[in-house]
């Protein structure tokens, strides 16, 4: 019995000892052991840590800050008590202040990581405020400006950021110019597509430069990029109609049913294309009104490009009376059309008797002209037909009715 009890106790102690051995040792601060660690390396070291571990790191940096503050205070006390002058103490003070500025910056980065994990930072911030209470002064500002870990480093980062922006601005202009030349050499590409590609390359390149500039300034761009992704999803869901116009704009750019400066009929509106974006197309009407049409309405409807071809047929109809000489009328129409300076000889104008209408015999007159001369030919020929028909005694009938009256006798 006693022997069995001894075995049970031995097994129990063995289990307790094994469990205690398997417990992980308490976390020890690592970053504060290297006081001169760079901010970038420090942030990378803090990323995988839990809130409790980051708090241990913050405690270590707080201890280091207290140590540096003690040195600064002791140095000032010795300088005030010295009767031989304070030169040696004054000479040591800048280095101490620089060290303190570096520790403060690293403690601030650690506290930011702790806040991101939901940790409590009040006691740390209270100590920082209390220990640097005299720091909100001109002397402290000058100390920070002259510190390699403060103003000097910020100025260098700002300079690198500005130089990065300038470099990417130049790169974006060069890239946009190369794209413009490349697209211009391709046959069949529209001005709309060229301008779109040039603007996309310029803006995307500059946006990348902006990200690099923010990074050079010491700003962590990872949350910014993540926020852009989330915002893109929300905005895309909210702007479904706009995205539909955007997709239609891309299709218009690729298949080029029209270009800037051409006259089109789209979505029931006829006008000259003044401008186009990926969302809408701007038309200028003949009376100089401006109409903005969503691209989705254009791409989902019939598009007529009136000025898309170099030449165009002018369709006209003229009528003469049933009692007139058709040969004479035909000859007059041929003479008028053939002598017009803007009418093409090839293809030859088409003049045919087309219809025996209610009040007239109608001729179709279809000459060809340059697209830009369409209305000049139309208006000139119409005026000439009226003048020549009147001079030759041919009638241009107007609608008329014959009324027959019958007398009914009782």
Image: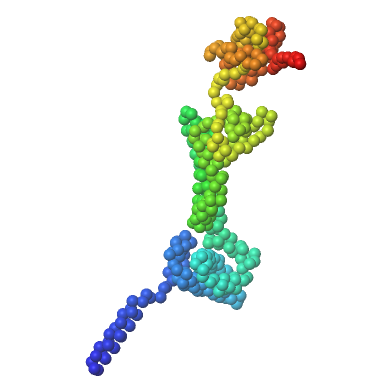
Image coordinates for residue 307, horizontal then vertical, percent: 57, 25
- The residue at the point 59 percent across, 60 percent down is 145
> Where 74 falls versus 179 (above or below)?
below
> Where 308 falls versus 43 (above or below)?
above
Q: How is the image coloured?
A: rainbow
Q: Can residue 345 be seen in this snapshot?
A: yes
> Where 409 falls versus 134 (above or below)?
above
- The residue at the point 65 percent across, 16 percent down is 358
Q: Residue furthest front?
A: 410
Between 351 and 60, the one lying in front of the other is: 351
Image coordinates for residue 162, horizontal then vertical, percent: 55, 49
- The residue at the point 49 percent across, 67 percent down is 117
Between 48 and 323, the one lying in front of the other is: 323
Image coordinates for residue 280, horizontal then vertical, percent: 59, 39
- Count the marks: 0
Between 389 and 228, the one lying in front of the other is: 389
Residue 269, quarter of picture: top right
Please identify the quadrant where the C terminus is shown. top right
- The residue at the point 47 percent across, 69 percent down is 51
Q: Can residue 34 be seen in this snapshot?
A: no
Image coordinates for residue 238, horizontal then vertical, percent: 56, 51
Please identify the quadrant where the N terminus is shown. bottom left
Between 192 and 205, the one lying in front of the other is: 192
Residue 404, quarter of picture: top right
Q: Residue furthest right?
A: 410
> Where 135 falls versus 316 (above or below)?
below
């Amino acid at each position: 019995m006693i022997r069995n009890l001894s075995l049970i106790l031995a097994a129990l102690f063995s289990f307790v000892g094994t469990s205690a051995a398997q417990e992980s040792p308490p976390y020890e601060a690592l970053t504060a052991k290297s006081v001169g660690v760079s901010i970038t390396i420090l942030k990378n070291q803090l990323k995988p840590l839990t809130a409790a571990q980051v708090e241990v790191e913050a405690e270590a940096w707080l201890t280091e800050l207290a140590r540096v503050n003690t040195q600064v205070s002791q140095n000032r006390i010795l300088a005030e008590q010295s009767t031989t002058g304070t030169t040696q103490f004054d000479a040591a003070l800048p280095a101490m202040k620089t060290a303190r500025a570096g520790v403060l910056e690293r403690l601030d980065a650690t506290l930011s990581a702790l806040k991101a994990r939901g940790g409590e930072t009040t006691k740390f911030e209270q100590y920082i405020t209390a220990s640097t209470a005299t720091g909100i002064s001109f002397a402290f500002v000058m100390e920070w400006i002259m510190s390699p870990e403060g103003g000097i480093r910020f100025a260098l980062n700002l300079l690198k950021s500005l130089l990065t922006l300038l470099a990417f601005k130049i790169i974006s202009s060069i890239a946009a110019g190369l794209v413009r030349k490349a697209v211009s050499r391709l046959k069949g590409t529209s001005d709309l597509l060229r301008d779109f590609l040039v603007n996309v390359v310029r803006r995307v390149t500059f946006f990348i430069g902006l990200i690099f500039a923010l990074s050079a300034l010491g700003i962590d761009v990872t949350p910014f990029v993540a926020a852009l992704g989330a915002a893109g999803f929300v905005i895309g869901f909210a702007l479904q109609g706009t995205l539909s116009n955007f997709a239609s704009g891309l299709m218009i750019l690729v298949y080029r049913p029209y270009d800037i400066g051409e006259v089109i009929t789209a979505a029931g509106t006829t006008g000259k294309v003044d401008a186009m974006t990926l969302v809408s197309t701007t038309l200028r009407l003949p009376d100089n009104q401006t109409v903005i049409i969503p691209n989705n309405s254009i791409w989902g409807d019939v598009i007529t490009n009136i000025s898309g071809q170099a030449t165009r047929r002018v369709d006209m109809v003229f009528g003469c009376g049933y009692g007139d000489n058709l040969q004479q009328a035909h000859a007059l129409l041929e003479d008028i059309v053939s002598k017009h300076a803007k009418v093409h000889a090839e293809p030859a104008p088409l003049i045919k008797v087309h219809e025996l209408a209610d009040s007239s015999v109608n001729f179709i007159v279809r000459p060809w002209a340059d697209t830009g001369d369409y209305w000049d030919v139309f208006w000139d020929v119409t005026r000439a037909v009226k003048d020549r028909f009147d001079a030759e005694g041919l009638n241009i009938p107007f609608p008329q009715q014959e009324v027959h009256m019958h007398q009914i006798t009782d």
